[in-house]
Amino acid sequence: MAELATIARPYAEALFKAAASDLDGAAGWLDSLAAIAGNPQLLQFAEDPKVTAAQVFDVVAGVAGPALPAQAQNFLRTVIDNGRLAALPEMAAQFRALVNARRGTSDAVIQSAFPIDAAALADVVVSLEKRFGRKLHAKVVVDPSLIGGIRVVVGDEVLDTSVRARLEQMKVALTA
């Protein structure tokens, strides 16, 4: 959603500047908060006009645990006070994009029909890093509908070597 991206950008940029000394730590707690804020029941609770910002903060902080650093608590209070809790997952995504841009890396989602063991994944990641020309942080998602092969998404680039994609190509070629 373009609107959420527009709302999230200033928050992500401000956090990126404020957390410049500990980007990995900030990314960790921000991902945790984003996962919590992605819960539809929590968002419904937060939007209730009878619920105060302090109550919403207490619920989110309680779920996040006692190890939430002061910077995370301040950031969360600001987000909640401004009514932007629904945009928190997008803030985390944009923050990760800023961190990746600084480091010259990218996030990669590798979809596979079957689970990939660690050794095979390491080989695949090395090949993909050569193909895309940058260091990748890979995440594997099992998708049985691919039938075989893999589908890789890096930013807006897609590399689809799945059996399903090849069958689709053959179908198009035969019906053309």
Image (spheres, rainbow, N blue to C red):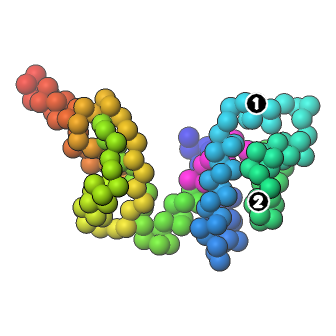
Q: Which residues are magenta?
A: 84-93
Give the vertical position of 112 relative to 97 (above or below). above
Q: Residue furthest bottom?
A: 21
Residue type for callout 2: Ala
Quarter of the C terminus within the rendering: top left
Horizontal arrangement in the rendering, residue 118 relative to residue 164 (left or right): right
* Residue on which disc 2 sits: 67
How many neighbours does mark 2 have within 10 angstroms: few (below 14), some (14-19), or many (20 or more)? few
**Residue at image x 20%, y 35%?**
163
Q: Is residue 173 above or below residue 129?
A: above
> Could you say where residue 25 lies in the image, as x and y percent from the top left?
64, 66
In which quadrant will I find the N terminus? top right
Task: Say if 65 sits above or below 51 in the image.
Answer: below
- The residue shown at (77%, 64%) is 69
Q: In this orientation, does residue 9 appear?
A: no
The residue carrying mark 1 is 44
- Looking at the rendered structure, the kind of residue marked 1 is Gln
| 132 relative to 22 in the view: left or right | left
Within the magenta stretch, is there residue 36? Answer: no
Query: Dot 1: few (<14), some (14–19), or many (≥20) neighbours within 10 Å?
Result: few
Would you say 171 lies left or right of 144 here?
left
Q: Residue at x 67, y 58 (%)?
A: 29
At a point 64% along the width and 73% down the height, the residue shown is: 22
Q: Which of pointers 1 and 2 lies earlier in the amino acid sequence?
A: 1
The answer to whether any part of residue 169 appears in the image is yes
User: Residue 64 — which label?
Assistant: none
As rendered, which of 26 and 8 lies closer to the eye?
Answer: 26
